[in-house]
Amino acid sequence: MASYSHSRLKAFENCPLQYKFIYIDRIDRHEEGIEAFLGSRFHEVMEELYKTLKFKLYPLPELLKFYENAWDKKFTDKLIITKENLSAADYKNLGRKFIEGYYKMYQPFDQAVTLGLEKGIAIPIDAEGKYKVTGYLDRIALTKDGAYEIHDYKTSGTLSEQKYLDSDRQLALYQIGLEKMWCDVKKVNLIWHFVAFDKEMVSTRTPEQLENLKRSVIGIIQKIESTREFLPEESALCEWCSYQDLCPKRKHQFFTEALPENEFLKNDGVQLVDAYAKASAELTELRKEAAQKTKTIEETLQKIREAAVAYAKNEKIEVVMGSTHKLSIKDKRSASIPKKGSLEREKLESIIKEINKWSEVSTLDASAFEKVVVGGAWPEEITGKIAPLLLVETKTSVTLSKLKQEEE
């Protein structure tokens, strides 16, 4: 049984193909960014601070010195800095501000008793022990009123909205594990420290929410283990993916972006796309022109049709001859039946039944009424009674056909 973590589950949700590269193919593309490096150093400082707290309060200057030593010792030029206007020194100074802000906010750090730091945990998801999730808790604490706390430090420049924290999976999973560690766990506060904003945010979970979370996690694991084809899933996260050169959706872009302009334009794929785009634009333009031309011709046809109908009525004829074609113009009357449930419909049915004609039009369809009302199948004294309940329309049809000699 594979070991799962929140980040592993998240990788599959974000992109199954990336999940495959990392956890199945084991292709190591770990490239640490300066933001992640800063986050790791801040976590080390927090561990040092609370580890020493049971003996003494760590003075802020010494804590900053510990941070700078850790930074200098582990810093490498291989760290990736994506923001061109910022340097490693800028991030180092930012870390100092985070530590100073946190220290001033919580000193003397007696809000709760620390029970664990950077503690590894195995979280049982089902009663049989078939599904487990592992993780590391930044800090576990116990308050004076008996509430347990799970702390998570965030050094990112984004402050999460409360609604996202209330649905956060990671710390809720840790709560499931925490409740298995001690038998007196009744209340658990999930706490995030957004140190870039000197902001503490708290959320809680009900037993029902935790049970739903277990079912959700089991569902994701089952989906992972039943997947045979790990397909790529494009999103905004692709820009930061380390496997773009292997991804069928990003591989060509990744390759061509590195080419000089003269080589880029000579690339076969680039030329094919450019040619396709040009042809597609030409086709779109032709369709627009054709649509406009069609509209113009349809308007002309309608005007000619109206003139031909007027001409035929004026001349009292039904066929108008041309040099190669003829127009057959015919008026046809049709009867519309009232809608079901209307008073007119009920009255219509009642009259027909009274005159014993129901069997002839029991379906009450338009064609049947055209025969009896318009076609004259019933006497006028009968149709006169029901005609006011019907909408009788006259429609003119215009049919174009070739002359026989033209067909030959």
Image (cartoon, rainbow, N blue to C red):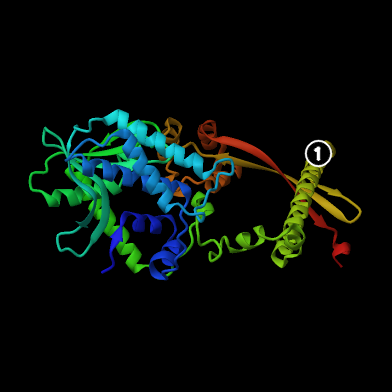
Q: Left or right of 76: which side holds 184?
A: left
Task: Out of 1 and 335, give the one closest to the viewer.
Answer: 1
Q: Where does the image place residue 99, in percent across and percent down from the top left?
A: 36, 36
Image location of residue 222, percent across then percent down: 30, 63
Residue at the spot of label 1: 303
Q: Residue furthest right?
A: 323
Using the rendered view, name the quadrant where residue 156 is placed.
top left
Q: Does residue 341 appear in this view?
A: no
Residue farthest top in this picture: 104
Where, quadrant-wise, is the N terminus in this rendering? bottom left
Look at 56% across and 61% down and name the residue there: 249
The residue closer to the viewer here, 236 or 283, is 236
Q: Residue at x 54, y 52 (%)?
A: 239
Q: Nearer the viewer, residue 151 or 17?
A: 151
**Total count of labels:** 1
Measured from the top left, where is residue 116 in percent x and y?
A: 19, 47
- Position of 104 with respect to 282 (left or right) is left
In the figure, is residue 122 to the left or right of 389? left
Is residue 97 in view? yes
Amino acid at pointer 1: Lys
Q: Is residue 248 above or below residue 339?
A: below
Which quadrant, please, contains the C terminus? bottom right
Residue at (31, 32) in percent of width and height:
103
As helix, strand or loop, the secondary structure at mark 1 comes to helix
- How dense is the environment of label 1, judged by Cα within 10 Å: few (below 14), some, or many (20 and up)? few
